[in-house]
Amino acid sequence: MKKTVLLYGLLGGVLIAVLKIVEYRYLVLEHSLEIYGGIVALLFSGLGIWLGLKLTRTRETVVVREVPVPVTGPFERDEKRREQLGITPREIEIMEAMAAGLSNREIAERLFVSENTVKTHAARLFDKLSAQRRTQAVQRAKEAGLIP
């Protein structure tokens, strides 16, 4: 009994597979033009959407704000503001060197410290001044009266 059920099941599966292959061949032969047309339409639609997004993307513009600083005499550091922000004298030295345009390596050589120490001080300065970049930190330090 089990052999008979197994044999009929196997023959049924083979018959279904043959019918699916015949149906597939019929579909591909009869409707090949529509299938290829659909594939080409999908490709061109995808290309058109990508190109449209690429061409119509808004450009990000960076606005640089220059703050005029009145020069009334020799520079006097705002010590009250420095203490309020919690900036150490060594961090001030690092900020002045950054304002002069020196790299981390040049600052390290000038101050006789390692480059990692300079990076640590710079990271702390960025945090204290709420800055993302060196230029932003220098500008905020100038606005706060910490560097000339």
Image (cartoon, rainbow, N blue to C red):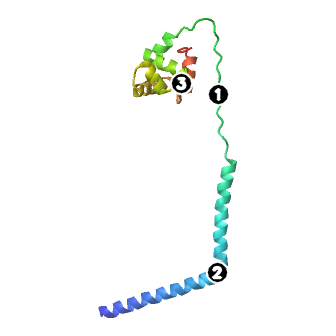
Q: Secondary structure at mark 2?
A: loop
Q: Which residue is mark 1?
A: 64
Q: Residue at x 69, y 48 (%)?
A: 56
Up-down relation of residue 43 to residue 55 (above or below): below
Identified by mark 1, the residue type is Val
Q: Which residue is mark 2?
A: 31
Q: Secondary structure at mark 3?
A: helix
Identified by mark 2, the residue type is His
Going by the image, does 6 lie left or right of 102? left
Circle nearer the N terminus (1, 2): 2
Percent x, y for residue 27?
60, 82
Q: CA distance from mark 1 to mark 2?
A: 61 Å
Report crowding for label 1: few under 14, some 14 to 19, many 20 or more residues within 10 A (C-alpha).
Answer: few
Q: Secondary structure at mark 1?
A: loop
Circle nearer the N terminus (1, 3): 1
Identified by mark 3, the residue type is Ala
Percent x, y for residue 146?
52, 15
* Quadrant of residue 9 within the rendered picture: bottom left
Q: Which residue is mark 3?
A: 137
Which quarter of the image is occupied by the C terminus?
Answer: top right
Camera-side residue of 20 and 92: 92
Going by the image, does 54 lie left or right of 96? right
Q: Residue furthest top?
A: 73
Circle nearer the N terminus (3, 2): 2
